[in-house]
Amino acid sequence: MILLEKENYYKVTEALSKVQINNLFARSVIENCVTGTVYVDNKEEPKAFYLVHPYGLSLLFGAYDNMDFNNSFKYYALNTNNKRDKHEWMQVYPEAWNTVVSDIFKDSLIKVSDNIEKKERGIIELNSRVNFKFNPNKYLKFKKEFIVADYQIVRTDRQIFHDMKGSVTPFAFWDNADDFCNNGVGFSLFHEGKLASTAYSAFVHDDMLEIGIETVEAFRGKGFAQYSCSSLIDYCIENKYEPIWSCKFENTNSYNLAQKIGFEVAAKRPYYRLSK
């Protein structure tokens, strides 16, 4: 694999446009909305690609029959040289890549449901990722059943951007607070004066806005996420954005919340965790 310079990201655009799965995170990288990494098989005329968003989301796409690239990717994915310091969560396209992944990682591929001791290195863990479709009628029904609670919702500002704690915060998806406030949007819920939950745009492209959500650990299980998400969905409706939701199938909290507030399962695909 060859690292592609930012000034050459335009060479990825055509291939990415052919990817028929949710890839807003990948667009954020190649359109320089956030600082990510792109690897290719050939700098001049790339045909195989591996793209990584700074949060750890990744996409393997393009030509799947370049053995040199595939072998180099195997070395990278298994973290043989111990250069990666965090997990990466990979989707692939087209479907044939799943067969290739199964073949090249046959000795290292495990299913998340396997009842075996998991190593932190040298494994590829097979999960599932769910893409949802927003149903406005289902959302309106949810809105009618809103329960009045003791909370305050405000627009997410620079201070909240920095104050919000957790692993899935705006900080993980935007380079800095100014960039987020100028190009993104979020709504944060306060309970008894304390920051509890933030729903925000993880990615915004064309008329699509993908929702990210984080709730402070001390406030989880209280239903606050549905209210902050509702404010963001209202913003999407008012500004003619299509709300986008996707999550790991095994993330039951996100999976159930999506369906509660108006989303329906649209697709379920293999999702690989590359161990650090």
Image (tube, helix red, strand yellow):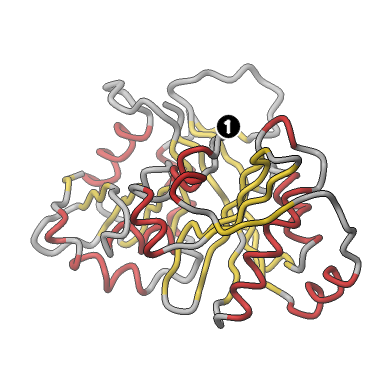
Q: Amino acid at mark 1?
A: Ile
For label 1, the crowd category at 10 Å Cα-Cα, with few meaning under 14, some 14 to 19 and many 20 or more, is many
Up/down of 123 relative to 239, above or below: above
Residue at image location 30% in from the left, 69% down from the top = 15
Front residue of this view, candidates 10 and 221: 221
Query: Does residue 117 appear left or right of residue 71 in this picture?
Result: right
Q: Secondary structure at mark 1?
A: strand
Query: Does residue 189 appear left or right of residue 178 in this picture?
Result: right
Query: Does residue 117 appear left or right of residue 276 in this picture?
Result: right
Tell me residue 243's x, y (percent): 60, 70
Tell me residue 10's x, y (percent): 19, 67
Front residue of this view, candidates 185 and 77: 185
Front residue of this view, candidates 211 and 128: 211
Quarter where residue 13 is shown: bottom left
Residue at image location 31% in from the left, 59% down from the top = 33
Query: Does residue 112 appear left or right of residue 201 in this picture?
Result: right
Residue at image location 23% in from the left, 49% down from the top = 39
Tell me residue 137's x, y (percent): 80, 80
